[in-house]
Image (cartoon, grey):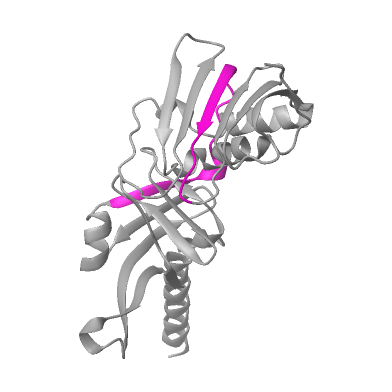
Amino acid sequence: MRKRSFLLLVFTSVFHVLFAQKKAPLTQGTRIDAERWITSSLGHLYFSDKKVYYNFVGYAGSKAHYTIINDTLIMADIYHSSADNFKQEHRDNFKFLIRHIDHNRLYLKAVEPNAIKLAGNTTYEFRNFKNSYDKNIEFSKIYFLSSTCFGDCPQLGIEIWPNGDYHLKAGEHAQPYKGNYTGRLSAVQLDSLNFWLKHSELKKMNDWQQGNQVVDAPNYYFAIDFANNKKKLSITTNEPPLNIIDLVNFMLSSYKKIQLTPVNQ
């Protein structure tokens, strides 16, 4: 009897250990909203200012609300409707199963109709964006344009060379500058620029096209000449994908951080 009880105890313990091991690897100590995620086709998923931003099938979007419950990511639209004279709060959920997550990979699948309409019925493999880096990216010249918008978006034309030489043509909303200026990036600033270039998945941008049409957003244009080949990369967008957001932000703020000298006309 004691032997049977002992075997039953061992079997029960092993069962619980195996069950726990089966459930535990799901999160691996990584929170989905603590990282930025990117797919091989430049889709993305990231969380900022309590919102979730996504691009599953070529069209970017965002949800103002989300929760994470165990192995489920729930995005939500919360709104009021004229159908009930705005008396009640309505909520539409978009549920995704977190099939696996660790520091390097995320596997995510839509599991109910709203989410499937948003993302399709496939399982998405995301990589942690912080691991994106191509040491072979070297530039010989960068040309960047930004347009105005209905607000105070600065109108900029910026050229940068590998030695840090910098030329600015400042238009509207680029105070205190207006006209042509020259300057030079510091060694630290040039290192930052090179880092963002290597971090931006530029080799995948040759055939990239923006899926959304965004209203009242500035247009950005890049023309990048590479040092190690004759190809020039051109990018036009008013909704930058995740992989170039940091590079765009660097360019937009660069003229505020260096000493500029007016060019006599």
Name the residue at 57% across, 43% down.
Answer: 130
Q: Describe residue 208's horizontal placement relative to residue 3 as left or right.
A: left
Picture residue at 56% right of the left edge, 22% below the top: 142
- Asked if the stretch drawn in magenta spans residue 149, the answer is yes
Where residue 87 sits: x, y (%)?
Answer: 31, 91
| Residue 37 or residue 265, whichever sits in front | 265
Up the image or down, 36 lies above or below 20; here it is above
Observer-nearest of 51 and 258? 258
- Taking the image as shown, residue 202 lies to the left or right of residue 264, namely left
Judge whether residue 94 can be spotted in this image.
Answer: yes
Quadrant that contains the N terminus: bottom left
41 and 206: which is toward the camera = 206
Indicate the position of residue 105 as horizontal and vertical percent values: 46, 49
Q: Residue at x 55, y 64 (%)?
A: 49
Left or right of residue 65: residue 115:
left
Tell me where residue 29 appears, x and y as whole percent: 57, 62
Work out which residue is located at the far top of the displayed protein and give it. Answer: 230
Residue 194 against residue 165 in the figure, above or below: below
The region drawn magenta spans 123-150
